[in-house]
Image (cartoon, rainbow, N blue to C red):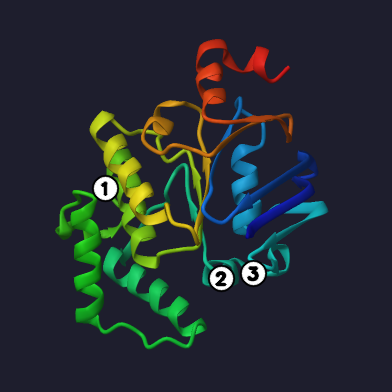
Amino acid sequence: MTMLKIENLHAEIDGKPILKGLSLTVNAGEIHAIMGPNGAGKSTLGYVLGGRPGYEVTEGSVSFDGQDLLDLEPHERAAAGLFLGFQYPVEIPGVSNVQFLREALNAQRATRDEKPLSGAEFLKLAREEAKKLDMDAEMLKRPVNVGFSGGEKKRNEMVQMGIVNPKFAILDETDSGLDIDALRIVGDGINRIMRAPDKAVLLITHYQRLLDYVKPDFVHVLADGRIVRSGGAELAHELEREGYAGVAA
């Protein structure tokens, strides 16, 4: 079953074209890695799919789980099962992780006509997810990402993903700022939460190292706003050896 279908997508920011005819199909049960040089449009692709303001789609279409994704507001995309993990997770002073995540989860449950979780039910779920990612449960009480290290922010984001349990995850350089141990923990978390026949992942990364833990079904090279080459996991190793210049030419 096709979960995400992007056709001839063009997008710009402040009048500058970034995506220039990108097409991609992701089926349920698949993990796709997007690699490419700086400025190729990788993060822009994630922002456009997530609905970040300021990114204007000028041509093309995106369907998600049978819906016109571009016609949905960001919160509607999240409620439909889309999760966007940021390259640089934002800090939200004054809002605790527990408060933020409970509101997010119950808002999504409401769109599915599901009963909201009580405070005790949610806290049990949150603690279980934190434990699976070796995150101190006390961090759930702290303001969202405030005072967190880069690795802690990424681990916290994986806890968020485990709690909302999305259908489709777009993870923008989740490996950025992670040491070897954190990389393994985050990779294991992605596999545990998202590797399922009714889910899919678009994994945006510069480096092959995360792909040692999260084995992709397909690897795509994004250059100058479009996908210029696709292959299996071996393509990531080729990029690691030769760089983007030769492979993307």
Answer with left or right where residue 228 lies relative to residue 59.
left
Among numbered discs 1 and 2, the one appearing first in the sequence: 2
Q: In this orientation, does residue 141 appear?
A: no
Task: State the CA–CA distance, disc 3 to disc 2.
Answer: 10 Å
Rendered location of residue 208, percent (x, y): 46, 26
Q: Which residue is mark 2?
A: 80
The local secondary structure at tag 2 comes to loop
Rendered location of residue 52, percent (x, y): 61, 56
Among numbered discs 3 and 1, the one appearing first in the sequence: 3
- Give the amino acid type for the residue marked by disc 1 in the picture: Gly
Question: Image quadrant for the N terminus?
Answer: bottom right
- Give the amino acid type for the residue marked by disc 3 in the picture: Glu
The local secondary structure at tag 3 comes to loop
Crowd class of label 1 (few under 14; some 14 to 19; many from 20; radius 10 Å): few
Depicted 177 relative to depicted 74: above or below: above
- Seen at 35% across and 45% down, the residue is 154
- Give the amino acid type for the residue marked by disc 2 in the picture: Ala
Q: Which residue is mark 3?
A: 73
Q: Nearer the viewer, mark 3 or mark 2?
A: 2
Q: Which residue is mark 1?
A: 147
Crowd class of label 3 (few under 14; some 14 to 19; many from 20; radius 10 Å): few
